Image (cartoon, rainbow, N blue to C red):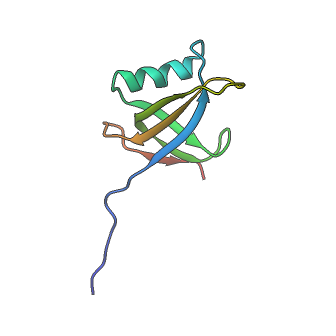
Amino acid sequence: MRATVATLKEASVEFEMVWDTADAGFTAIKNAFFQNDPIGLQILDDTGGQGLQADFSITNFSRNEALEEAITVSVTAKVTYSATAPSWIGG
């Protein structure tokens, strides 16, 4: 009989946000991408809800320019190595 335990886990999140240089969250994510710095994020299902809390590396930050709508950016964030281990909060 053999017992198996998963030891490596991988997580990533993809989302879009409005291109707004006056927004502190946008600026923090943009800077994390261009400076190759980790950024702490909580990816929750609702305000005060449950989800993943970890330090992420922003691996994609692509500007989308629609003709009639606001400029947006597509973001991909992947859990990265840090002194703070990823955790599940809530629930």
Toward the top, the furthest residue is: 22
Task: Name the quadrant of the N terminus.
Answer: bottom left
48 left or right, relative to 77: right
Residue 68 rendering spot, x and y as whole percentages: 72, 25
75 to 12, vertically: above or below: above
Residue 43 rendering spot, x and y as whole percentages: 55, 41
Residue at image location 71% in from the left, 26% down from the top: 69
Q: How many marks?
A: 0
Residue at image location 60% in from the left, 47% down from the top: 50
Residue at image location 33% in from the left, 69% down from the top: 5
Toward the front, the furthest residue is: 67
Residue at image location 43% in from the left, 34% down from the top: 60
Toward the right, the furthest residue is: 68
Residue 78, quarter of the rendered image:
top left
Residue 41 rendering spot, x and y as whole percentages: 49, 34
Residue 46 rendering spot, x and y as whole percentages: 67, 42
Residue 66, quarter of the rendered image:
top right
Toward the left, the furthest residue is: 2
35 left or right, relative to 13: left
Q: Nearer the viewer, residue 88 or 58?
A: 58
